[in-house]
Image: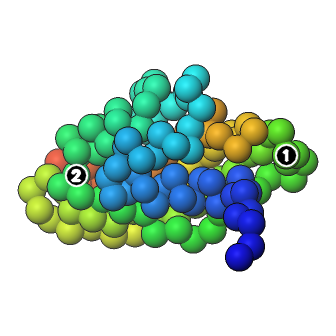
């Protein structure tokens, strides 16, 4: 039997995302620091994974992330690391219309094995403007 190896910053972010996409905001709390700061798409401040799940529930029937890559920024230490997770969203809008290929970039600050900051950007607002006839691609 081997000792369990602690997760590195990239694995912490990917496991957090896997659990939050279930969605299981309670389980996702195992990967965050109590003082978590979230800036969600549109600059919305949040403090807990349950807030991101509630926001997504008001925008999508369901949504998942397809990871393209998870990058550890140069200069990371065991105490602090910056991690980017990049990919596309897929799912269904509230009216049930499926979508895929919606780009996203997430930036995480991981300190001492816990996520302390999360910044989220994606193209959903632009796609919603196109669906409403207010913009063109």
- Counting from the top left corner in percent of width and height, residue 116 is at 63, 33
The image shows residue 135, relative to residue 8, as above or below, that is: above
Residue 32 coordinates in the image, percent (x, y): 56, 38
Q: Quadrant of the N terminus?
A: bottom right
Can you see residue 76? yes
Name the spot of residue 37 as percent of width and height, x first. Answer: 55, 27
Q: Which color scheme is applied? A: rainbow
How busy is the neighbourhood of tag 1: few (under 14 within 10 Å), some, or many (20 plus)? few
Q: Secondary structure at mark 2?
A: strand
The residue closer to the viewer here, 65 or 41, is 65
For marks 1 and 2, the one nearer the N-term is 2
Q: Is residue 43 above or below residue 7?
A: above
From this view, report whether residue 133 is shown above or below residue 110. Answer: below
- Which is more foreground, mark 1 or mark 2? 1
Residue shown at the point (48%, 55%) measured from the top left: 17
Residue drawn at point x = 38 percent, y = 41 percent: 26
For label 1, the residue is 78
- Give the residue at x 11% y 62%: 96
Residue 60's disc number: 2
């Amino acid at each position: 039997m081997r000792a369990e190896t602690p997760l590195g910053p990239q694995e912490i972010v990917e496991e957090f995302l896997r659990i939050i996409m279930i969605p299981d905001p309670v389980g996702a709390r195992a990967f965050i620091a109590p003082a978590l700061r979230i800036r969600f798409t549109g600059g919305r401040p949040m403090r807990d994974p349950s807030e991101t799940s509630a926001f997504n529930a008001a925008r999508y029937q369901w949504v998942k992330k397809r990871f393209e890559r998870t990058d550890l920024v140069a200069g990371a230490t065991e105490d602090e690391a910056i991690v980017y997770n990049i990919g596309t969203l897929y799912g269904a809008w509230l009216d049930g219309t499926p979508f895929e290929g919606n780009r996203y970039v997430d930036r995480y600050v991981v300190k001492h094995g816990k996520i302390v900051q999360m910044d989220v950007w994606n193209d959903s607002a632009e796609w919603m403007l196109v669906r409403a006839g207010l913009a063109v691609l």
